[in-house]
Each structure stands twice: as structure tokens, then as C-alpha cells.
Amino acid sequence: MRPPTARVTGTAPFRWLFVLIATALLTVSASGCGALADEPDGSGGFASLHREGGFAGRWDRVTVYDDGALRIEHQGARASLARLTGQEMSRLRALLREAGFADLPRRSVSDIGGDRYVYRLTHRGHTITTDQSRRLGAVDEVIDLLDPRLAGGR
């Protein structure tokens, strides 16, 4: 008597459908895991600005690397690369030094006006979340500097 062997049961079309679906799922999940081939070096970057909300409730993010390189991401789209000018990078560094993260509230978001953008600025382990309903000095200037880079994904 022969020992039983494992096999996929069902008719041939259903077996092929199973194989096709499994292959498609593996391909889609693997394609989102890699970084851009020409992505700047650095883990997490020098600073990042995440923006979400507005009427459409979408999100965008720009990551700034030490050399001024930018990685710009928009919900549902492939990331793109850009670069700050030397003057913009110098201004960003000065604003982040001036911001005084330790003295600011971690969250400054109004309960009024649900269609506003909410920004999350991260720099060296500090994160500030704001909708700009309350002025936060240099943090608002950083947002004003980086926010135009996010406008291209709409």
C-alpha cells in the first residue's frame, strides 16, 4: 500500500486561480517593502513633516536628510526625491535649533475646524503635532518652509 501524498484538491481551474491569487498577493506585498534605488542614505532622516486631513482626509510626508535631500510621499503614490537648496537647508537647521521643542506642547490641535490639516513635525526624537490654530513660532516657520514641497501630490 502506498502512503498518502499531499495534493491540492479541486478542479484544475480552481487550482490555477489559487496559484494566481497567491502569486499576486506575494508580488504586491513585496513591492511595497523596498526603498527607492536612489534613496539618500540615512535612517529616518534629519527631520520629517507629516501632513494629514483637509477635506479629502489624505496624508503626505516629506523627510529631510542631512545633505538636504528630500523624500516626498503622498498617499497612494510612489515616493519622489528632491533637494533643498543650501540656503533652505541652512534656514531649516536654524529654525529647528530655535524651535525649543522641550518648551512646546507635544500636541496643539483645536477641537474646532475639523477640515484643517494636522502636521506632525519630528526632529531628533522630538515630535510636535499642530494644526497651526495656535502659533508655535519657529515650528510654524518650518511647516511654512516644507509644506510647499507636499503640494505636488494633489
Image (cartoon, grey):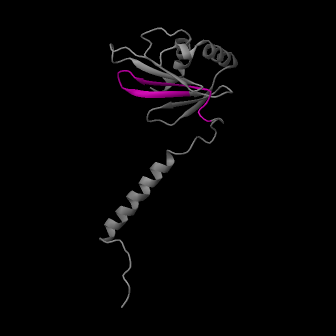
67 left or right, relative to 107: right
145 left or right, relative to 89: left
Find residue 58 and report its horizontal and vertical position in percent.
40, 28
59 in relation to 148, above or below? below
Find residue 84 and report its horizontal and vertical position in percent.
64, 22
- Return the residue found at the far left: 10
23 in relation to 63, above or below? below
90 left or right, relative to 111: right
Q: Residue at the spot x=44%, y=33% of the render?
A: 75
- Identify the image quadrant of residue 87: top right
- Identify the image quadrant of residue 65: top right
Q: Residue at the spot x=35%, y=18% of the render?
A: 115
Q: Residue at the spot x=33%, y=15% of the render?
A: 111
Q: Is residue 61 magenta?
A: yes
Q: Main secondary structure of the magenta part?
A: strand
The quadrant of the rendering that contains the N terminus is bottom left
Which region shows up in magenta? Answer: 43-62
11 in relation to 23, above or below? below
- Return the residue found at the far bottom: 1
40 left or right, relative to 150: right
Q: Nearer the viewer, residue 67 or 80?
A: 67
Q: Nearer the viewer, residue 154 or 26?
A: 26
